[in-house]
Amino acid sequence: MTRPSPIVAPSILAADFAHLADEVRLVEQDADWLHIDVMDNHFVPNLTIGLPVVQSLRPITQLPFDVHLMIDEPRRWAPAYADAGAYNVTFHAEACDNPVALAKDLRSAGAKAGLAIDRDTPIEPYLELLPSFDTLLVMTIKAGFGGQRFVPELLDKVRQVRAAQESGHLELRIEVDGGIAADTIEQAAEAGADAFVAGTAVYGADDPAAAIRRLRGLAAGRGGHR
Ligand code: DX5
Ligand code: ZN
């Protein structure tokens, strides 16, 4: 089975919020998606950006927006991100009692639907829901903050979903988020991930665009060269 080419999604959580438009332009030529972390100080202790910022950023770039909602009550808030032009809207399984219904709402609002699984949540109860989703985001840290250390054991969830995918007809991007960098991305790719969020590894680099190219090369098994 051939894998789709890897998606690299820089996370603007690690960018300079005083110059967001410039920070987006820095990665525009090389990123596949722009990962936008929305945190509400309830589902996670941190508070980041919300709908008005997504609406303001939408016209300044062609990049597809990969919105990662770390919020309570996603059924109430998530469709507005689809209306704002997000390409993919991911909400957390832990925050939603009817993930399939919300996936349908998001798809009818014109977005792809993503399900996120936090560090302490097992994947098994959600396997049967995956045909309703376009992306599955497996946290490789505890959701809430950038710059944390990658937890390799969490890739077991990626392996499980990849195995389920290879034995069935599941079409799904498997995305990993948290601590993805040059020294961790290859193991995530080997486990079966095909979309990679990177905050610190991109925006903490001297040349964010070059960092993205290197990550994509490593994920594709080309030793960091394109
Ligand atoms: C954290 C966010 C991540 C964060 C990753 O909860 O979901 O997207 O930006 O940051 P790094 O790549 O620095 O671990
Ligand atoms: Zn994220």
Image (cartoon, rainbow, N blue to C red):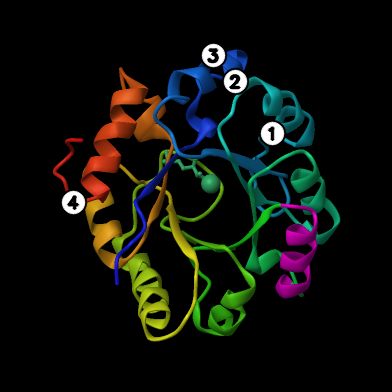
Q: Amino acid at mark 2?
A: Phe
Give the residues drawn in magenta, as a range.
99-110
Mark 2 closeness class: few <14, some 14–19, many ≥20 residues within 10 Å: few
Between the C-alphas of marks 4 and 2, the distance is 33 Å
Real-space Cα distance between discs 1 and 2?
9 Å
> Disc 2 on helix, strand or loop?
helix
Q: Residues within 10 Å of mark 1 (few under 14, many from 20)?
A: some
Is label 4 within 8 A of ligand 1 (CB to nearest ligand atom)?
A: no
Q: Quadrant of residue 29?
A: top left
Q: Are marks 3 and 2 in contact (CB under 8 Å)?
A: no
Q: Residue at x 54, y 33 (%)?
A: 13
x and y, in percent, of residue 84 in the image: 77, 38
Q: Secondary structure at mark 4?
A: loop
Badge 3: how crowded within 10 Å, few (<14), some, or many (20+)?
Answer: some
* Residue 221: image tag: 4
Question: Are the two marked residues, 1 and 2, in contact with CB atoms closer than 8 angstroms?
Answer: yes
Q: Earlier in the sequence, mark 1 or mark 2?
A: 2
Disc number for residue 22: 3
The quarter holding residue 96 reads: bottom right
Mark 3 beta carbon near ligand 1 (under 8 Å): no
Residue where numbered disc 1 is placed: 49
